[in-house]
Amino acid sequence: MNPTPAILAENLVKRYPVFRGFRDLVRRPFEKRTTTALDGLDLRVEPGRVFCLLGPNGAGKTTLIKILATLVLPDGGRASVAGHDVERHPGPVKNAVGFAINDERSFYWRLTGRQNLEFFGALYGLRGPAREHRIDEVLRLTRLGAAADLRFNSYSTGMRQMLAFARALLADASILLVDEPTRSLDPQAADRIGSFLRGELVEGRGKTVFWATHDLAEAAEFAHEIAVIGRGRIRLQGTVASLTGEGRTSLRQVYEKAVGDPPVSR
Amino acid sequence: MSGGSRTMTLLPGRLSAFLRRDFREALTYKFSFVSSFVGILLSSATFYFVAKLVPPGTPSLEPFGGDYFSFAVVGVAFSSLLGMFQEGLSAVVRSAQVSGTLEALLVTPASIPTVLFGSSLYSLILQVFRTVLHLGVALAFFGMTLGRVNVPGVLSIGVLTVLCFLGVGILSASFILVYKTGNPFGWILGTVSGLLGGVVFPVALLPPWIRWVSSLLPVTYALDGMRKSLLASAGLAEVLPDIAALAVFNIILLPASLLAFRLAVRKAKKDGTLSHF
């Protein structure tokens, strides 16, 4: 086992404050109400693989990704990325991680794809010819070269998702966080993205892809390893083959059992 | 290279990237500059005709050179500039929250202060340009008269005022990060300053029972010192009280605003609401 995991979470806890109306605030001003998103989550992801985090809506997938991307602070436990603690050393974490935000609103629509990448490249500390070279490289990798000088608002949904990958790859980070990247894509486009993540990035370049999804089929097809999260904890983790008993049971049955069951050790 | 010195080395490139981004976006909105210029012309024309109602030698205008048009143009031009410094930072936070770009900016290694200042830099520079243009239009087309300009006074007051209003801007941005809308700093200072800060009429015209509120507003000292330095040929010694008052505001506001901002970022990250709107 590699001594430094790509991602490590130990007893990770996250609770969000519950929105309260004015009447409630006046009646009970000092009461704190929270909802638990992560409830003592433990997870270890080894480098150089596609790791799919499966779980139903509200299970805590996005919260975990946002903690790993330093956008949300945990309330308990600890998480580290490439050996850097997300709370104490967010700077090195940001250099180690590329977060492919799948919200198309996270781009500047009136700028071209290349202009968007030039801007974000500068924020990642890239300058001059090195930045231009890197932009050309990620555009080639994501097959957006021909559309690079078109305005972002003319891109299709699939192209926008690929530009999100291009942006996340600008800094050549070793770990890519992706949150439901195939949502709202047609099956062919979703398949291309799965092949890109596993073939180009992981097998071709040795990166780690941490992929949150609730699509069992794409997880079964592209993941080296999966974990199922339910009610804020990892319910099971392993390869698809090991979890399904080499195909004796379906991934769906395993998933449904896991989401309803208490945690199972690895 | 240490993390801090690397950040400083990268800062000019990052700030210029923000400027280039906003300039490129502005170029796609072809008529915004034209409408801004027309707005300046109309504002100057309005005060030019209002000034005809105010006879020369009005006692309350004497400390500022005696001409109401020049008094009003300096007030309006500089209060717009200060308003931008006061509101600009919170406006970019709000805009990035609503447009959806905030998370994408915050996952980069650029620090949050760099993102905040960089995002508002273009608007701030544009507003400085508009202020100069406003004064230029008033001088060239409407007969505004300057006194013997006290350059050290203008620079001292200008720098202290900008820092002071940046402090208010950082407080506003902190509020927006946590509470999203309803920024009280911008509202209170913007509205109250417009009425009581001497923007379009001298503070001396206010009834004594409310005049004390003016003395609590940084805009009062900023405009008083700027007008005396630009219009009334006042020396550095004559604007020293304004400089001292602005320095006191800075000593209080800058550390307080930086602390508030740090706490606001932490709270937004704790609550998971950094990019909510």
Image (cartoon, coloured by chain):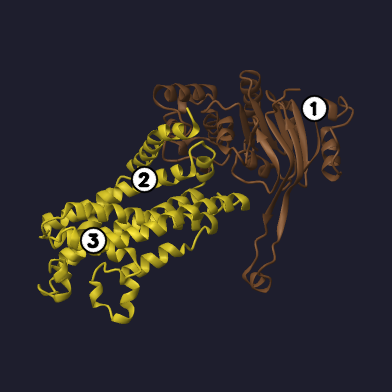
Chain colours: A brown, B yellow
Which three-letter amino acid code belongs to the residue tagged 1? Thr
The disc numbered 1 marks a residue on which chain? Answer: A
**According to the image, label 3 marks what residue?**
B240
Residue B242 in percent (x, y) is at 26, 62
* Label 2 neighbour load within 10 Å: few <14, some 14-19, many 20+: many
Q: On the image, which quarter does residue A8 sit in?
A: top right
The disc numbered 2 marks a residue on which chain? Answer: B
Q: On the image, which quarter does residue B190 sit in?
A: bottom left
Verify CB contact (< 8 Å) between mark 1 and mark 3: no
Verify CB contact (< 8 Å) between mark 1 and mark 2: no
Which three-letter amino acid code belongs to the residue tagged 3? Leu
Marked residue nearer the N-terminal end (2 or 3):
2
**According to the image, label 2 marks what residue?**
B121
Q: On the image, which quarter does residue A162 sit in?
A: top right
**According to the image, label 1 marks what residue?**
A239
Quadrant occupied by the C terminus of chain A: top right
Identify the residue at image location x=65%, y=26%.
A208
Q: Is A51 in front, or is B75?
A: B75
- Residue B126 vertical position relative to residue A145 in the rendered view, above or below: below
Q: Is B152 in front, or is B173?
A: B152
